[in-house]
Image: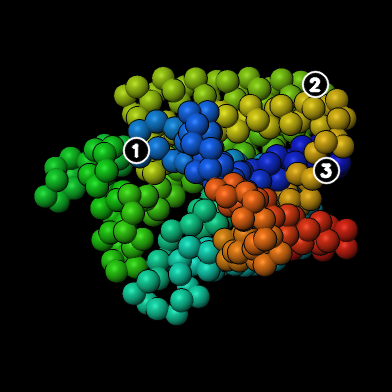
């Protein structure tokens, strides 16, 4: 769209990262200290449900994939124009796929433990992004727009069928229940001892990851179009409401389960992502209310680094070296303070990188 950087995408990405690197731990520690019904509800919204249903925290991972898809029309169209042939583009796609997968191994695959018995092949958001980004990018490069919608529909339909039609050995027909889904059976069978041993599914769930990333691609195409910005915001909102409504209605028969990334979850979560983007886009890119979003922009423009650092380095423990004297006065609330302090250290690193124009591009 008109060649301008879409500040709302950076800000929304920063908001998403803020939920991951700070809010979940903050509200958990706050509830541990306060123990009130209100803090319990806040903490509950920043934790995943046991199986069925959804909380606010369940939108964080889909939003990450969605925003990766949203920038594809901007980044790839520019590369296609600047490149002589598709070879350099393929090289970039494969490089990014591999880096994201390796970072996923570092963050949650236990790669740094150097213990094969603890290693997980596929168990992280960054690896889900790698899958969604690679296949969505290839589809964007080679297919006309109408076929992108076909691929999106194929992904959610075929995955819904995978979760309900095949038979799981010794269990009968696949069901959307813990340890009874065909997707989980395939993960256990393919990954073997390198499976993450959880109720989350990854391999066949790639269909859902691709669909979620493609939904972001569609949003990016709306923003990149020549529509007036007010209409862009309106269309994003309408698509969001439609996706959320269809996902919730379909969820009556095909339940919303984040751990399986069911097709109803893809539609409902993508709908929420569209709505969030429409709000951020309206406020920031239409109404030009940008100052409040500057802290989010700092996080969003180095989102991958923020994510990896927050998972690999225990910043609250580092903050303890400076704040430990407060524990005697704050009691149970000290963990809240150390959480804030740890986030402050990470934010300072991201701010310093931003001020020095240091942006880690993968």
The residue that appears at 86% across and 41% down in the rendered structure is: 4
Indicate which disc, 3 or 1, sits on the residue closer to the N terminus. Answer: 1
State the residue position of label 3: 294
Whether pointer 1 and pointer 2 mark residues with C-beta atoms closer than 8 Å, the reply is no
The residues tagged by marks 1 and 2 sit, at their Cα atoms, a distance apart of 39 Å
Task: State the residue lying farthest toward the front.
Answer: 328
Bin the neighbour count of mark 3 within 10 Å (Cα to Cα): few under 14, some 14-19, many 20 and up. Answer: some
Q: In which quarter of the image is the N terminus?
A: top right
Q: Nearer the viewer, residue 207 or 114?
A: 114
Q: In which quarter of the image is the C terminus?
A: bottom right
Q: In this view, does 71 lie above or below 310?
A: above
State the residue position of label 1: 51
Count the marks: 3
The residue that appears at 11% across and 50% down in the rendered structure is: 170
Q: In this view, does 253 lie above or below 157?
A: above
Of badges 2 and 3, nearer the viewer stands: 3
Indicate which disc, 2 or 3, sits on the residue closer to the N terminus. Answer: 2
Q: In which quarter of the image is residue 19?
A: top right
The residue that appears at 39% across and 44% down in the rendered structure is: 259
Bin the neighbour count of mark 1 within 10 Å (Cα to Cα): few under 14, some 14-19, many 20 and up. Answer: some
> On the rendered structure, is 358 left or right of 324?
right
* Residue 155 seen in the figure: no
State the residue position of label 2: 230
Q: Which of 111 and 101 is in front in this view?
A: 111
SS category of the residue bearing label 2: helix
Colouring of the image: rainbow
The residues tagged by marks 2 and 3 sit, at their Cα atoms, a distance apart of 22 Å
Task: State the residue lying farthest toward the left.
Answer: 170
Q: Which of 225 and 55 is in front in this view?
A: 55
The residues tagged by marks 3 and 1 sit, at their Cα atoms, a distance apart of 36 Å
């Amino acid at each position: 769209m008109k060649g301008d950087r879409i500040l709302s995408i950076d800000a929304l990405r920063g908001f998403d990262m803020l939920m991951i690197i700070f809010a979940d731990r903050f509200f958990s520690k706050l509830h541990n200290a306060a123990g009130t019904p209100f803090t319990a509800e806040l903490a509950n919204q920043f934790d995943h449900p046991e199986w069925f249903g959804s909380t606010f925290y369940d939108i964080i991972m889909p939003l990450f994939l969605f925003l990766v898809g949203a920038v594809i029309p901007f980044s790839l169209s520019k590369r296609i124009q600047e490149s002589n042939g598709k070879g350099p583009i393929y090289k970039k796609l494969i490089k990014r796929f591999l880096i994201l997968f390796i970072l996923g191994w570092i963050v949650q695959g236990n790669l740094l433990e150097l213990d094969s018995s603890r290693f997980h092949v596929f168990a992280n958001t960054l690896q889900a992004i790698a899958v969604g980004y690679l296949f969505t990018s290839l589809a964007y490069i080679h297919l006309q727009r109408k076929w992108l919608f076909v691929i999106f529909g194929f992904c959610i339909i075929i995955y819904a069928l995978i979760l309900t039609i095949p038979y799981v050995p010794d269990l009968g027909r696949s069901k959307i229940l813990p340890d009874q889904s065909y997707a989980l059976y395939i993960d256990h069978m393919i990954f073997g001892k390198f499976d993450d041993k959880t109720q989350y599914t990854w391999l066949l769930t790639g269909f859902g990851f691709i669909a979620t990333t493609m939904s972001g691609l569609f949003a990016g195409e709306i923003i990149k179009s020549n529509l007036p910005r007010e209409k862009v915001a309106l269309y994003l909102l309408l698509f969001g409401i439609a996706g959320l409504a269809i996902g919730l209605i379909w969820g009556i028969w095909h339940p919303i389960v984040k751990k399986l990334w069911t097709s109803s979850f893809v539609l409902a979560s993508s709908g929420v992502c569209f709505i969030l983007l429409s709000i951020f886009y309206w406020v920031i890119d239409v109404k030009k209310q940008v100052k409040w979003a500057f802290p989010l922009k700092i996080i969003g423009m180095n989102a991958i680094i923020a994510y990896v650092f927050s998972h690999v380095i225990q910043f609250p423990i580092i903050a303890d070296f400076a704040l430990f004297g407060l524990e005697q006065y704050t009691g149970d609330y000290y963990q809240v303070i150390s959480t804030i302090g740890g986030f402050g250290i990470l934010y300072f690193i991201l701010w310093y990188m931003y001020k020095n124009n240091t942006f880690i591009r993968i």
